[in-house]
Amino acid sequence: MELDAYQRGALRTAASRETKNELLHLVLGLVGESGEIAEKFKKWVRDLGSDEALIDRGDIAKELGDVLWYVAVLADYLDLSLDDIAATNLAKLAARQSRGVLGGSGDDR
């Protein structure tokens, strides 16, 4: 599936841009869903000894899908294309790799 096609599909279940505080709702939703993934891994460490064979990949996939939905709808709210975001990100990472600065910190390296 193409990312922009997914984005269009996600918008079918999104609230209107005109909904009060919709931008804040989308940002907080993205953070919340990301936190749910972190919480599942916290319990994996605490309860399952960090055994990778015991990761519930189906459950993680569902949560990643929720994150993807929020990313897609938030990007649309800001008039951004997921295809463009993905291409720009890959180009940025390739440039960092070619300069030997994939590791480290800072946005502009």
Image (tube, helix red, strand yellow):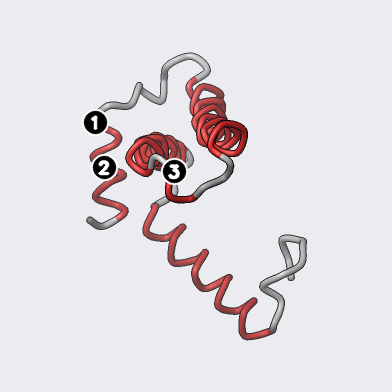
Residue type pointed to by label 1 = Arg
Please give the residue where the numbered disc 3 appears in the rendered image: 55
Q: CA distance from mark 2 to mark 1?
A: 7 Å
Looking at the image, can residue 76 be seen?
Answer: no
For numbered disc 2, what is the local secondary structure? helix
Please give the residue where the numbered disc 1 appears in the rendered image: 12
Q: Quadrant of residue 41?
A: top right
For numbered disc 3, what is the local secondary structure? loop
Q: CA distance from mark 3 to mark 2?
A: 31 Å
Give x and y (percent) for residue 38.
Answer: 57, 36
Q: CA distance from mark 3 to mark 1?
A: 31 Å
| Quadrant (top left, top right, bottom left, bottom right) of the N terminus | bottom left
Left or right, residue 101 beside residue 2? right
Foreground residue among 18 and 49: 49
* Contact, mark 2 vs mark 1 (Cβ under 8 Å): yes
Please give the residue where the numbered disc 2 appears in the rendered image: 8
